[in-house]
Image (spheres, rainbow, N blue to C red):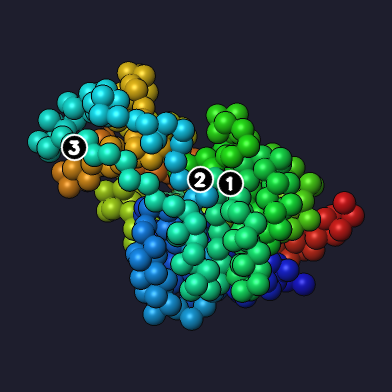
Amino acid sequence: MTWNRNRLTEKLGIDYPIIQGPLGGLSSQRLTAAVSNLGGLGSFGALSLSPEEIKNVISQIRSLTSKPFALNLWVSMEDDGAHSSDEAAFNRSLAPLASYFAELQAPRPQYRPYSPSRFEDQARILLEEKVPVFSFIFGIPPKEILDECRAKGIVTIGTATTPDEAVAVQEAGVDAIVASGFEAGGHRGSFLRAAEDSVTGTFSLVPRIVDVVDVPVIAAGGIADARCVISAFALGAEAVQMGTAFLTCEESGASRIHRETLMQRKAEFTGLTKAFTGRLARGIQNRLMSELEQERAEILPYPLQRMLVRNLSIAAEAAGRADLMPLWAGQSANLSTCTEVSVFLNSLVEEVSEIADPLTEWSAKRRQKK
Ligand SMILES: Cc1cc2nc3c(=O)[nH]c(=O)nc-3n(C[C@H](O)[C@H](O)[C@H](O)COP(=O)(O)O)c2cc1C
C-alpha cells in the first residue's frame, strides 16, 4: 500500500488524494485543470453561475484537461425571506455601507427585485454534461438527481459540518463526504442545525465522522501543508480538501490584492461573519468585517446580502482597498506558500510521501477494526 492509493483515489481516478476545494466565486478553469493535470482533483465552484455559464465552464475545463475534475453546487441557494425582502429592507442594509461607497467614490447600488436561480436547473447541466465528479454543500440533492448521477457514473461528494449531517449524506447514497471543520475558509455549509451551532474543529470532527460512516471521508479546514495532510490521514481521512492554500496560487480566481493579503501577517486573524453574504462565512478580519459586526447592521437574507456587498467589493478591489472587501480565508492562511500550483503540489506530494506510508497503513487497519 502507498499513501496515495485508496478506494477513493480509485473511484475518482486520481493519482493523489488531494482535492483543491471549490472556491465559489473565486474558482478558475485554469486552477481546476492545473490541479487535475498534476494528479489531484481540481474543483470548480459554480454556485452563482447560470446553466449556460456552467456549460461553458465545463467545456473550458475539458479543453484544459482530460483528467477528472469536480463541479460544485450549493443545494440550498436562498434563505427564508429572500422572496419577500423589499426595497425598504434593501435601503436599511445599504445604510451602513453608504459611507464606504462614498469613500470609494463609487455609485450606490440600486434596489432590484430578487430573481432567483434554481439548483435543479444548474444540476441538470452537470448531468447532461456527465461531469466526472459532482460535489455539493448546504444540503442533499433530491433523490432523482443522485440516482441519475449513479446511473451516469458521476461520482458524488457531499459536505458535512457535523456527524449527524455526515450520516444523512451517507444515507442519501453519496460516494464520499467532506468533513468541513471550523477552521475552513468561506461558508459553513451546515444544513441540519444553525451554522453557529455547527462549529467543530477539523481535529475533532474528522475522527467523529470517520467513526459513524463507511464511505471515505475527506478532511477539510485548516489543511495547508504536509504536516496537516499527514495529520488528516492519521485521523482516518482518505483524502484532504484544501481551499485557502490554493487561493493564494497565481492560477486562482482571487484578485491580486486578496492573494497578497493572504500571505501577510494580518491573515492570521480571521473571523466568522454573516455580514458579507447573509450566511456564516470565514474571512480575514478587516475594517469592513469589524465595523459591520460592531454596527449590528441589518443583514439581508442570503443571497441578497451577498449581492449587495458584492457591489462594494468590486469598487474596493478596483481601488486597491483590502480593508473594504470580503477577504475569504481559513485559519491556516499564514501557512500558505503557494504562488504556483505545480510547485506547491509537487513539493506537497514529495514531503507527504517521505512519511505517510506506515501511517496510512495503520490508519486503514484501525478503520477496519471499527
Ligand atoms: C473563497 C472560498 C470559496 C469557497 N466556496 C465553496 C463552494 O462554493 N462550495 C464548497 O463546497 N466549498 C467552498 N469553499 C470551501 C473549500 O472548498 C474548502 O473546503 C475549504 O476552503 C477548506 O478549508 P481551508 O480554507 O482551511 O483550506 C470555499 C472556500 C473559500 C476559501
Residue at (67% x, 43% y) in the render? 165
Decide which of tag 2 and tag 1 comes sooner along the chain.
Answer: 2
Residue 30 locus on image (x, y percent): 37, 69
Q: Secondary structure at mark 2?
A: loop
Task: Pick whichever, 306 or 80, lies toward us.
Answer: 80
Cα separation between marks 2 and 1:
6 Å
Residue at (74% x, 42% y) in the render? 208
Decide which of tag 3 and tag 2 comes sooner along the chain.
Answer: 2
Q: Are marks 2 and 1 in contact (CB under 8 Å)?
A: yes
Q: Is residue 203 left or right of residue 120?
A: right
Q: Are marks 3 and 1 in contact (CB under 8 Å)?
A: no
Residue that mark 1 sits on: 139
Cα separation between marks 3 and 2:
25 Å
Q: Secondary structure at mark 3?
A: loop
**Quick one: label 2, few (<14), some, or many (20+) residues within 10 Å?**
some
Residue 76 — which label?
A: 2
Decide which of tag 3 and tag 1 comes sooner along the chain.
Answer: 3
Q: Is residue 268 left or right of residue 161?
A: left
Q: Is mark 3 within 8 Å of ligand 1?
A: no
Q: Secondary structure at mark 1?
A: loop
Task: Pick whichever, 192 or 104, lies toward us.
Answer: 192
**Quick one: label 1, few (<14), some, or many (20+) residues within 10 Å?**
many
Q: Amino acid at mark 3?
A: Pro
Residue at (16% x, 43% y) in the render? 319
Cα separation between marks 3 and 1:
31 Å
Q: Is residue 293 above or below residue 2?
A: above
Task: Pick whichever, 329 or 1, lies toward us.
Answer: 329
Q: Amino acid at mark 1?
A: Gly
Residue that mark 3 sits on: 109
Mark yes or no: residue 86 visible.
Answer: yes
Residue 197 locus on image (x, y percent): 60, 29
Q: Are marks 3 and 2 in contact (CB under 8 Å)?
A: no
